[in-house]
Image (cartoon, rainbow, N blue to C red):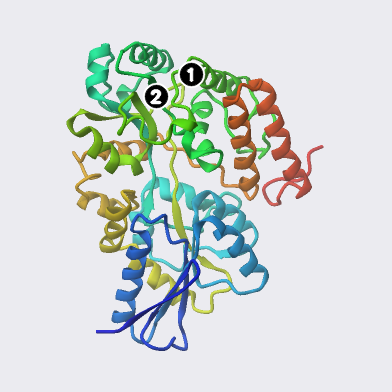
Amino acid sequence: MRLTKWLLTGATILVLGGTAVAQDTIKVWHHGGRGDGERESIAAGVEKWNELHPDMQAELVLLPEGSYNEQVQAAALAGDLPDLLDFDGPNYANYAWSSYLQPLNDIVSQATIDNALPSVIDQGTYPPDGKLYSLGQIDSGLAIWGNRAYLEKAGVRIPTGVDDAWDMAEFEDALAKLQALPEVEYAIDLKLSYGKGEWYTYGFSPIIQSLGADLVDRSTWRAKGTMDSDAAVKGMTHFQDWVKSGYVVPASAGDDAFYGKKNAALAFVGHWMWTPHHEGLGDDLVLLPMPKFGDKHVTGMGSWCWGITSTSKNPKATGQLLEFLLTDEWILAMANRNGAVPGTNTAIAKSKLYGEGGDLSLFVDQLNSIAVPRPVHPAYPTITAAFAQAVADIIDGADVAGALSTAAAEVDQDIEDNQGYPPFGGMMQ
């Protein structure tokens, strides 16, 4: 059995198979996760690969998530990117546009691609050339978690699936009824405790998308008239009204109002809260589909995924390692540790939680029917930062239309400053 060394320097962990790095080493970077078992899972996968491939060793470097993107950018400028790189899904378009990545279509097998969830393919397909630049071991999901005892006491209908979801009127009626219960201090936890950041975009953009708006127009790739459209203003006005009505757990109240204190009746959040929710509520826990706020039904999706860099000296071997990590064994090893949705059809079929009839199978149903990826555009870092700031301002009581207009203008200015990020689109006339 091969000896694996763990070298710890600051927040970086280096995993090497054997006592020396082989000449044709496949260099791998991973963000390390947030203490939810991801780093152990990926380390075990790479170690097993090294045991099976003594002449094709892999070197894994785990980097701190908070500064991961900055370290990737710095490595790219220095010409020092690894062969296999993981990254948060919505950021890959910027990497592809910057020529950090190469298409996977001719590197990994079609069988591997066909096994991926449709949402994983949608996220990883680059609009200008229609090629696939990323594949993920996992995906994510967004839904409503409910306290069954409170729902039944308030006389609120409990939806049974995607096609049975609440609309806006029924959702807001449920908030009012639940808020009236003596046991309930807040009808819903929107996880404002997560703070301004990607959660505000991931979690709340489906509200405006359901009503017909979006973060950007996905044909013109401009935000003005879309992020600040009447439909977007309508959606975020509803959102602000929930806050003003006292329905929403404030950020200062922490994370456990729904599953710990039990003074919140609903939690608007993703799959990652399964364990604390299940442990806290037991049989009273019920998973509800995303409400259909408007004419279009939308849920959030997307997660960390893998790509092969354009500077890789051995893309064929790197592709073989990627396919190894995308087998059911290692996908389930990851998903069972961090609670995420398995990223392939075969792994889902073997999952107790996400397979047919599983407690979390609703997330799969939503990913296969109503999931919308965040905009696959190189300006996404600016798009999400601008929208998240608008959400934060709206929570604080700012004029909704004004906040969204400011955000849209910031996005379009960035796009103009980069000449439209060709080939996405040239300068506006």
Task: Report x, y in % for residue 234.
Answer: 57, 18
* Residue that mark 2 sits on: 188
The residue at the point 78 percent across, 47 percent down is: 417
Count of all numbered marks drawn on residues in the image = 2
Of labels 2 and 1, earlier in sequence is 2
Q: Answer whether residue 216 is visible to the viewer in this image.
A: no
The quadrant the C terminus occupies is: top right
Instruction: Provide residue 94's location: percent of width, then percent of height.
Output: 61, 54
Residue 425, numbered label:
none
Indicate the position of residue 108 as horizontal and vertical percent values: 41, 66
- Which residue occupies 29% across, 81% down? 51
Report the amino acid beneath label 1: Trp
Q: As rendered, which of 264 and 205 lies closer to the eye?
A: 264
Location of residue 280 with respect to 56 vertically, above or below: above
CB under 8 Å between discs 2 and 1? yes
Residue 429 visible at all = yes
- How many angstroms separate mark 2 from mark 1 (CA)? 9 Å
Rendered view: 117 above or below 44: above
**Residue at coordinates 78% horizontally, 43% vertically from top-left?**
427
User: Mark 2: which secondary structure?
Assistant: strand
The dot on residue 242 is: 1
Compared with 74, 22 (above or below) is below
Task: Sort mark 2 into few (<14), some (14-19) or many (20+) by Cα contacts within 10 Å.
Answer: many
**Foreground pick, 173 / 425:** 173
Q: Quadrant of the N terminus?
A: bottom left
Which quarter of the picture shows residue 328?
bottom left
Q: Tell me residue 228's x, y (percent).
A: 65, 26
Q: Residues within 10 Å of mark 1 (few under 14, many from 20)?
A: some
Q: What kind of residue is marked 2?
A: Ile
Q: Quadrant of residue 49?
A: bottom left
Relative placement, left or right, of 287 versus 98 is left
